[in-house]
Image: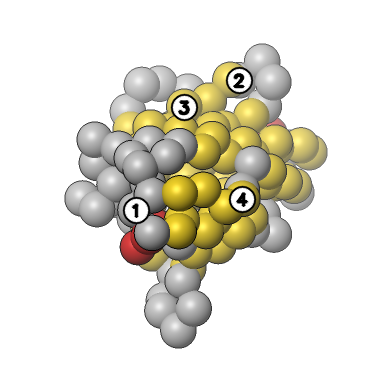
């Protein structure tokens, strides 16, 4: 089992920045990839960004490319999502996720095995 705990959400004005953190514990050696998804009220959960637990490959949704950066600190078992130039449409609950298998695109929830409880991000206009 892998446990994921997100932190760093909050309220920010449009154009501002936030950094989300996701601390992983448990069988972290079994993680192949980690990612971030988000879900706004009345909408489906959507892919934001992903990276392999080891290696440099990163993947981003078109809507956040150039504004968000995913990174990780393997020594701390922590994944980060740096969010810059935030827009009101970025408002959502953000979820950290981890998968134990090699994915195809890393953009679908069913490619992951573990989920955090989510952290709210609200961007005011």
Q: CA distance from mark 4 to mark 3?
A: 20 Å
Image quadrant occupied by the C terminus: bottom left
The quadrant where residue 29 appears? top right
Foreground disc of the pair 1, 3: 1
Earlier residue among tags 4 and 1:
4
Foreground disc of the pair 4, 3: 4
Which is more toward the observer, 74 or 83?
83
Residue denoted by label 1? 87
Could you classify mark 3 by the number of other residues whose Cα lies within 10 Å: few (under 14), some (14-19), or many (20 or more)? Answer: many
Residue contact at pointers 2 and 3, CB within 8 angstroms: no
Q: Secondary structure at mark 4?
A: strand
Give left or right: position of 74 versus 46.
right
Foreground disc of the pair 2, 3: 3
Earlier residue among tags 2 and 1:
2
Q: Secondary structure at mark 2?
A: loop
Say how many tags the image has: 4
Residue 32 appearing in the image: no
Earlier residue among tags 1 and 3:
3
Residue contact at pointers 4 and 3, CB within 8 angstroms: no
Q: Position of residue 33 (x, y in %)?
A: 48, 39
Q: Position of residue 103 (x, y in %)?
A: 37, 49
Could you classify mark 2 by the number of other residues whose Cα lies within 10 Å: few (under 14), some (14-19), or many (20 or more)? Answer: few
Residue denoted by label 4? 10
The residue under the point 60% across, 59% down is: 120
Residue contact at pointers 2 and 1, CB within 8 angstroms: no
The residue under the point 54% across, 35% down is: 19
Residue denoted by label 2? 74
Which is more toward the observer, 71 or 30?
71
Residue denoted by label 3? 71
The residue under the point 52% across, 58% down is: 122
The quadrant where residue 45 appears? bottom left
């Amino acid at each position: 089992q892998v446990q994921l705990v997100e932190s760093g959400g909050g309220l920010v004005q449009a154009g501002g920045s936030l950094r989300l953190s996701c601390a992983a514990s448990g069988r972290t050696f079994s993680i192949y990839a980690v990612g971030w998804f988000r879900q706004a009220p009345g909408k489906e959960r959507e892919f934001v960004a992903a990276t392999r637990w080891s290696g440099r490959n990163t993947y981003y949704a078109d809507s956040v490319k150039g504004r968000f950066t995913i990174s990780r600190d393997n020594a701390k078992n922590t994944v980060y999502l740096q969010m810059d130039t935030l827009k009101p449409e970025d408002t959502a609950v953000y979820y950290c996720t981890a998968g134990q298998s090699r994915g195809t695109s890393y953009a679908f929830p069913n490619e992951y095995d573990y989920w955090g409880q989510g952290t709210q991000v609200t961007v005011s206009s």
